């Protein structure tokens, strides 16, 4: 209560504050995407390079950062077989080494396709089209820039797997996890370095080898709790960008198998394959079936946003549908997922995205990388604590330099208890009564000694029983003897 100075006779009015301050809840799903873009222009050319910018929708991203990289002609070989009477067979051969390595445009698009909202973009450099190199030093420099942005709560660097080596990939992943663990207000989403495709040599891919690279690139138990890894990559419904009319038909043969050298190498806008012709349209339609493969973190950032907005941050971001996806590029069975979800050796869990008949493509894992830790095993628990810690921290700023006495203790305790009561009522905290779901302690003899007060410390202890996901549903059936 403010001290009222009485010096002149008269009537004085004094307002008495009886309500405690309130906790303003911070946002929980604002990702930062770091990578290469077509441009980085806001007011002048390149003025957004290495500067974080808040983007609210995909149109804003395209306005400031441009479009997708244009794939080069030598990254694709087109073969046409002419059977006559406008009957054609069209086949494509791809050279992945000549395909563009830049995927941030598609990644941000996938984020918004899966429920994304506000995000931050850091363009580390621009591209002019075609295949290029991804420098891990650029990515870590962009990550350092986002270190100063307090709003960010998720980290995604979808071009980290394209850095060229496991060592470079490990450098970027370590930097992401270190930042999340140091600041304790954000969560890192880790993509696989490689996903070995299914082939004759690898009928089920090489899941164990791929996942081992992820586990070797991550940190120890005290830091891995601030990150989650996902596997495998996703075949999206997005199309590659080609300068279509300048693509060449590499081989053109007739049904007798005789190559017509005069037609080999024709541009698609050539008079013999004119725009609007049946062959032109068929090539274009077939090319549209070649889909972009993306790492899973951008889609997961969108799913985190959707779940937080519609169900709450305490709901595990799992058993959720991944949108704009044809399917994962490697199929994973129950048996194959066993060692990914629970690893007795390293203790590092890797969540998977699987395709289930009748259900679609689902996120089928809810663990942090620290998957064997009873405290921080689940993503929802870690992120809920992040939210509460940051919200209470910011909302307690008023108490700095206030008298370290009972009146201040009562206010700060009431502020936090009121906030946690609302979270308990929403279902975030487990317990039939509020006292079973949380506690807040502060005061001399409870959380502080006389020495604490002399040294200016106010210790507040907060305990929460966060609701945990039902990861394993066990249905027990038994037969009963006939009773009548």
Image (cartoon, helix red, strand yellow):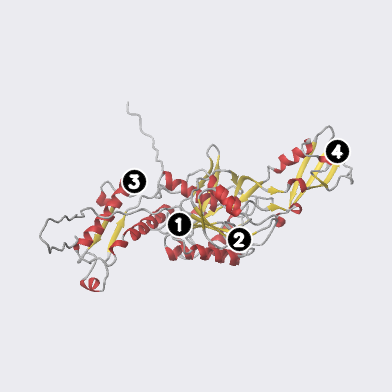
Say which residue label 1 marks.
153
Check the image and report above or below for 307 versus 370: above
Residue 6 in percent (x, y) is at: 13, 63
Check the image and report above or below for 433 versus 37: above
Mark 1 surroundings: few (<14), some (14-19) or many (≥20) residues within 10 A:
many
Asked whether the beta carbons under mark 3 and mark 4 sit within 8 Å of each other, the answer is: no
Q: Is residue 241 left or right of residue 169?
A: right
State which tag comes first along the sequence, 3 or 2. Answer: 2
Residue 228 in percent (x, y) is at: 49, 56
Say which residue label 2 marks.
46
Say which residue label 3 marks.
427
State which tag comes first along the sequence, 4 or 2. Answer: 2
Mark 3 surroundings: few (<14), some (14-19) or many (≥20) residues within 10 A:
some
Mark 3 lies on a secondary structure that is loop
Asked whether the beta carbons under mark 1 and mark 4 sit within 8 Å of each other, the answer is: no
The image's mark for residue 302 is: none
State which tag comes first along the sequence, 1 or 3. Answer: 1
Q: CA distance from mark 1 to mark 4?
A: 59 Å
The quadrant in which the N terminus is found is bottom left
Asked whether the beta carbons under mark 2 and mark 1 sit within 8 Å of each other, the answer is: no
Circle 1 or circle 4, nearest the eye: 1
Residue 253 in percent (x, y) is at: 85, 42
Residue appearing at x 55%, y 53% in the figure? 231
The image's mark for residue 255 is: 4
Mark 2 surroundings: few (<14), some (14-19) or many (≥20) residues within 10 A:
some
Depth check, front residue: 6 or 34: 6
State which tag comes first along the sequence, 2 or 1. Answer: 2
């Amino acid at each position: 209560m403010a001290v009222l100075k009485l010096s002149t006779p008269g009537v004085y009015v004094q307002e008495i504050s009886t309500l405690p301050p309130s906790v303003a809840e911070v946002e929980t799903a604002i990702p930062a995407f770091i990578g290469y873009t077509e441009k980085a222009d806001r007011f002048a050319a390149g003025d957004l390079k290495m500067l974080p910018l808040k983007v609210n929708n995909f149109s804003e991203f395209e306005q400031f950062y441009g479009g997708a990289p244009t794939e080069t002609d030598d990254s694709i070989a087109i073969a046409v077989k002419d059977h006559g009477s406008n009957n054609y067979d069209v086949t494509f051969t791809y050279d992945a080494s000549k395909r563009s390595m830049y995927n941030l445009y598609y990644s941000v698009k996938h984020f918004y396709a899966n429920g994304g909202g506000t995000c931050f973009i850091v363009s580390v450099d621009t591209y002019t089209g075609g295949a290029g190199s991804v420098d891990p030093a650029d990515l870590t420099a962009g990550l350092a820039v986002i270190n100063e942005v307090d709003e960010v709560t998720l980290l995604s660097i979808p071009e980290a797997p394209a850095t060229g080596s496991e060592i470079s990939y490990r450098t970027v992943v370590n930097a992401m996890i270190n930042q999340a663990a140091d600041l304790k207000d954000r969560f890192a989403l880790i993509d696989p370095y490689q996903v070995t495709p299914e082939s004759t040599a690898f009928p089920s891919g090489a899941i164990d080898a791929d996942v081992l690279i992820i586990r070797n690139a991550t940190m120890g138990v005290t830091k891995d709790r601030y990150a989650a890894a996902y596997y495998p990559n996703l075949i999206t419904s997005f199309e590659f960008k080609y300068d279509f009319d300048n693509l060449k038909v590499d081989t053109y043969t007739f049904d007798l198998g005789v190559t017509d050298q005069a037609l080999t190498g024709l541009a698609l806008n050539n008079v013999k394959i004119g725009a609007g012709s049946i062959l032109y349209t068929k090539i274009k339609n077939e090319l549209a079936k070649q889909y972009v493969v993306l790492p899973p973190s951008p889609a997961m950032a969108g799913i985190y946003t959707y779940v937080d907005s519609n169900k709450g941050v305490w709901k595990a971001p799992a058993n959720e549908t991944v949108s704009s996806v044809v399917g994962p590029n490697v199929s994973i069975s129950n048996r194959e997922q066993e060692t990914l979800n629970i690893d007795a050796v390293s203790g590092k869990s890797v969540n998977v995205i699987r395709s289930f008949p009748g259900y679609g493509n689902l996120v089928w894992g809810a663990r942090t990388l620290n998957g064997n830790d009873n405290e921080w095993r689940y993503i929802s628990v870690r992120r809920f604590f992040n939210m509460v810690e940051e919200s209470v921290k910011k909302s307690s700023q008023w108490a700095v330099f206030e008298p370290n006495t009972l009146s201040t203790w009562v206010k700060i305790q009431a502020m936090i208890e009121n906030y946690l009561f609302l979270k308990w009522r929403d279902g975030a905290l487990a317990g039939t009564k509020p006292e079973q779901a949380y506690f807040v302690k502060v005061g001399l003899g409870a959380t502080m000694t006389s020495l604490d007060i002399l040294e200016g410390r106010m210790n507040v202890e907060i305990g929460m029983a966060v609701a945990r996901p039902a990861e394993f549903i066990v249905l027990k059936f038994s037969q009963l003897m006939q009773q009548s």
